[in-house]
Amino acid sequence: MNYFKLASIQSKLKKLEEWLRNRLRYFIWHDWKKPERKRKNLIRLGIDQNHAYAWSRTRMGGWAVAQSPILRTTITVKRLKMKGYVSLTEYYK
């Protein structure tokens, strides 16, 4: 019976962690504010100039951009960990 509770907690932590990572990406995107800064930062993160230009001027909202492939592939879990983000599931284990 304890195994079911453990699995339940881990799955809930995983969902919460996904949401937190998206929220962090949202805050980063929102912090960049202006399209030119967004473009420069996307280029620094490894996106080619054409895609960086297009994505920096998107009309999508910040939350939609945070969940988009452009931020998921540039602001990865590895990069977040380098900046001090601690995974909830790793912390739980």
Image (cartoon, rainbow, N blue to C red):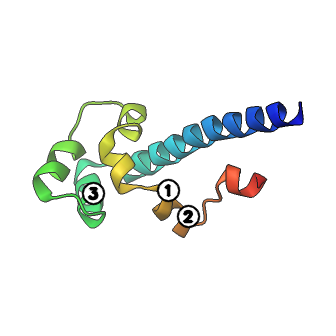
The CA span between labels 3 and 2 is: 18 Å
Q: Position of residue 15 (x, y in %)?
A: 61, 35
Which is nearer the eye, 17 or 1?
1
Residue 93 sits in which quadrant?
A: bottom right
Question: Considering only vertical position in the picture, is 58 above or below 78?
Answer: above
The CA span between labels 1 and 3 is: 16 Å
Provide the residue designation for mark 3.
42
- Seen as rendered, the residue at the extreme bottom is 82
Task: Examine the rendering and report whether any part of residue 47 can be seen.
Answer: yes
Task: Examine the rendering and report whether any part of residue 33 can be seen.
Answer: no
* Rendered residue at 60%/66% (across/down): 84
Provide the residue designation for mark 1.
77
Kind of residue indicated by mark 3:
Leu
Whether the residues at callouts 2 and 1 have beta carbons within 8 Å, the answer is yes
Residue density around tag 1, few if under 14, some if 14–19, many if 20 or more, within 10 Å: some
Which is nearer the eye, 33 or 85?
85
Residue density around tag 3, few if under 14, some if 14–19, many if 20 or more, within 10 Å: many
